[in-house]
Amino acid sequence: MLTMERARELLATTTTEDHLFLHAKNVSVAMGGLAEHFGADREHWMAIGYLHDYDYEQYPQEHLSHTEGPLLAAGLMEEEVRAILSHGYIHLNDVEPRTELEKSLFTVDELTGIIQAAARMRPLGITDMEVSSFMKKFKDKKFAAKCDREVIKKGCQMLGMEVRDVAAICIEAMKAHAEELQIGPKA
């Protein structure tokens, strides 16, 4: 089973850019929150979240096309690789998210981008962020415009949850890691 330690080792073999490591941490932490919500293995979900963009830096135009073989060769289980591939559903491939793990990853990949952007605009960062302020930013399509809100809505629909409820879980999880995620209070 994929661990955080192994996920860090593997991502370090393909990734050098700080912003990609930061994104990996954001997704990982949010996945931990959702794992707790669903009563699943928190560290395992966090590891999957951390490793989800394994081939992105090397192959941004072919993202996820260079993931399956290397990760299977590295010892990941087929269902772990499938979970990673499923976050590209619709835009990059046809691996439809089926499990709570896959649906969560599909959703939080984009969702954490809006949460992080919103937190960076606040004097106290994410530490005092409420879901209502996130929802205002979510509804403003010009804010964090590269984050695909339709993917987030589709993912939440797959999970059988409202956007605000998934966001609340992710925000709370991310608050506990505010400094590491660079969304703590401004100095």
Image (tube, rainbow, N blue to C red):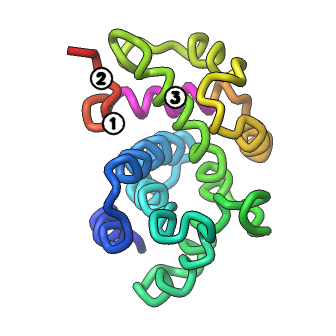
User: Taking 110 as reference, is 98 above or below it?
Assistant: below
Amino acid at pointer 2: Gly
Residue 186 x, y percent position in the rendering: 26, 15
Q: CA distance from mark 3 to mark 1?
A: 11 Å
Q: Nearer the viewer, residue 29 or 184?
A: 184
How far is the residue under mark 2 from the one under mark 3? 12 Å
Query: Which of the numbered marks, if any, corresponds to residue 115?
Result: 3
> Left or right of 76: which side holds 159?
right
Q: Quadrant of residue 180?
A: top left
Element on which disc 3 rests: helix
Going 52% across and 28% down the picture, which residue do you hit?
115
Q: Secondary structure at mark 2?
A: loop
Categorize mark 3 by other alpha carbons within 10 Å: few (<14), some (14-19), many (20+). many
Contact between labelled residues 1 and 2, with CB atoms less than 8 Å apart: yes
Number of numbered labels in the structure image: 3
| Depth check, front residue: 106 or 173 | 106
Mark 2 and mark 1: span between their CA atoms?
Answer: 8 Å
Amino acid type indicated by mark 3: Ile
Residues shaded magenta: 166-176
Residue labelled with disc 2: 184
Which of marks 1 and 3 precedes in the sequence?
Answer: 3
